[in-house]
Amino acid sequence: MAEYDPTTFEGVYNNASTGSFKTTGLQAILAATMRQFVTDIKDSFSSNHKQVTVVTTSDLTLDFSNRQKITFVGSASFSAAKTVTLANDSAAQRFYLAVQITGTPTLDFGSGSVFKSNHNDFVASTQIFTFTGGDGFYLFTGTKVGSNWWLTVEGPFA
């Protein structure tokens, strides 16, 4: 059905003049409207965690869609340097980024957010992670602490 942020959900269902469940007067609620309502609640609020594919043929844009938690999965293996940009992340608290690499590409996390990590392949002054562990799958976990992102990196996995 539809996935709504809280403001849109309120407008669709609780608007006094146009909402499905108007806030003024008594009304009959059709079964189809109730089924749509239940589905939209499930899609919009039951889980704030979603898995999405992030295109790896160009720089990586991690679009949170105003979610708190999200998993990004790379669309394909890559071997070239990439810049990582966060988008629509005002409510963000945690992300997972799973990518497959070949060679020794880099991920530049320095575009707008502050990242920290104790991983040997991450250089805090440049915000760049260099894959020196070899080919394979890597999992980045980003946890927001204050205004900074703390990165944990696992891999490579075969």
Image (tube, grey):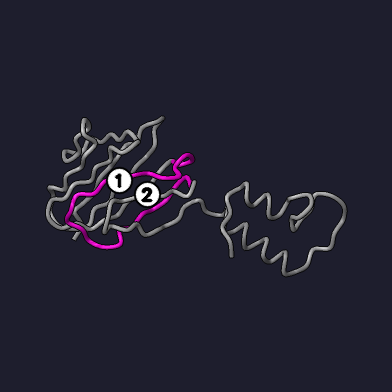
Q: Which badge, 1 or 2, is on the more N-terminal residue?
A: 2
| Kind of residue at badge 1 | Val
Q: Is residue 79 magenta?
A: yes
* Quadrant showing the N terminus: bottom right
Whole-percent x and y of residue 13?
A: 71, 54
Q: Is residue 35 magenta?
A: no
Q: Residue furthest bottom?
A: 32
Structural crowding at the residue carrying mark 1, measured as other residues with C-alpha within 10 Å and reported as few (<14), some (14–19) or many (≥20)? some
* Residue holding disc 1: 84
- Label 1–label 2 contact, CB within 8 A: yes
Identify the residue at horizontal 29%, vertical 40% (top origin): 151
Q: Which mark is residue 126?
A: none
| Kind of residue at badge 2 | Leu
Report which quarter residue 53 is drawn in: bottom left
Structural distance between the alpha carbons of marks 1 and 2: 7 Å
Residue 9 shown left or right of residue 28 in the figure: left
Secondary structure at numbered mark 1: strand
Identify the residue at horizontal 36%, vertical 32% (top origin): 148
* Residue holding disc 2: 62
Secondary structure at numbered mark 2: strand
Report which quarter residue 126 is drawn in: top left
Identify the residue at horizontal 72%, vertical 64% (top origin): 34
Q: Which residues are magenta?
A: 67-92
Whole-percent x and y of residue 111?
A: 31, 38
Depth check, front residue: 94 or 20:
20
Structural crowding at the residue carrying mark 2, measured as other residues with C-alpha within 10 Å and reported as few (<14), some (14–19) or many (≥20)? many
